[in-house]
Amino acid sequence: MIMLNLCWVCLKHAKPADNRQTKTMLTGLNNRKLIYPNAAIKLLSAILICTLWATALAQKATVDTTIFSIGKQVHLTLVLETTETDHVQWPQFGDTITRNIEIISRDKTDTTIVESTNKLRLHQSYTITSFDTGYIILPPIVFKVTDQSGQVSDLATEPVLLNVQKVPVDLKKDIRDIKPLLEAPYTLADFLPWILLLLTISLAGVLVWFYIRNRKKKKPLLRISLKPQVPPHVEALQQLAQLKLEKVWESGHIKEYYTRLTDVLRSYFEKRYGVQAAEMTSDEIMEAMLPLLVEPELTSALKQILTLADLAKFAKGQPIGHENALSMEKAETIIRNTAAVNKPAVVEKNSSENDIESSTQKLQ
């Protein structure tokens, strides 16, 4: 509408080409022309101004410079003004805009409000470059805008002429790069192989030094102190001594007393003879230990202990006091006598009994 009004004003105030009142129209297919040259020029100027004015307000594409050297990076900015009710389809690019214009990076689309208006200004910046010299045209970039009524409009920017210049070359000088090499910052990954190599060499040197020093002194390279393993009968007698000091059955805990007492014997049989007594019933234990217990008194003592234990644990029986103390004595007898059967164990018998007595004194 604004453009039509400007055109009407131009036609209304136009004057003839000269002062003669010639308003004739020379007709002819080849000689038709208008006698109002000033009006035609003003009409075309008005159309051009209106078009450029509308384009400048709606959408535009600008670069910070149109003349740059090959490979140099310049910034392209796309701007579009629209209303809040419009739906805008922003132009999408891959790595290039055209065959000659490449995109290095791009920012996110930003939105600002135009002051004193209800319009929104959308803008996005790109970093572009070109590796072709000469004049290169940045073509019109189209925005698809859908208004509230559903009408779709294609708003295109004005084309931009870019002048990509060659790098001036002085043929008298040596050949060199267009730009110097970029120095990448050092990271830990760059030094990690050297650090590992240095640590390996240092460790190897320390080991060699220890080897040479200990070899002269006739010592082993590494001294590994191993804790001496406690013999099974010593460990079992210590556990019985601890059970006796706690006075479990005297406190009325008969079931707990026989459970712990039989657990000590089961663990001892497993370590001493390899019998999996922890997973066996009383009858299975008797069957497995019968050929291992040489003396009949030991077999009878074990059977009495297991019988009283089953009575206390499963039949809820209450063995009398002297039976509980007697079960402890019989268990100690079984362990001492079976340890004495093995000759290496006989050597340790005196020392083991001393250990038991010393541990008992400490607990008391």
Image (spheres, grey):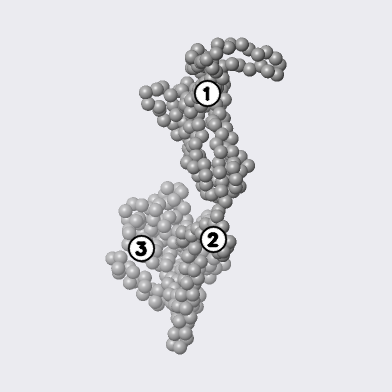
Q: As displayed, is residue 99 above or below residue 227?
A: above
Q: Mark 2 = which residue?
A: 276
Q: Say which element carries label 3.
A: helix
Which sits earlier in the primary sequence, circle 2 or circle 3?
3
Q: CA distance from mark 2 to mark 3?
A: 24 Å
Q: Say which element carries label 1.
A: helix
Q: Mark 1 = which residue?
A: 45
Give the percent coordinates (x, y) of residue 191: 48, 65
Q: CA distance from mark 1 to mark 3?
A: 116 Å
Front tag of 1 and 3: 1
Which sits earlier in the primary sequence, circle 1 or circle 3?
1
Which sits earlier in the primary sequence, circle 2 or circle 1?
1
Q: Say which element carries label 2.
A: loop
Question: For the residue marked with disc 1, what is the amino acid?
Answer: Ser
Q: Are marks 2 and 1 in contact (CB under 8 Å)?
A: no
Q: Mark 3 = which residue?
A: 242
The residue at the far right in this view is 29
Q: Is residue 125 visible?
A: yes
Residue at image coords 48%, 80%: 208
Question: For the residue marked with disc 3, what is the amino acid?
Answer: Gln
Q: Is residue 303 visible?
A: no
Residue at image coords 70%, 19%: 30
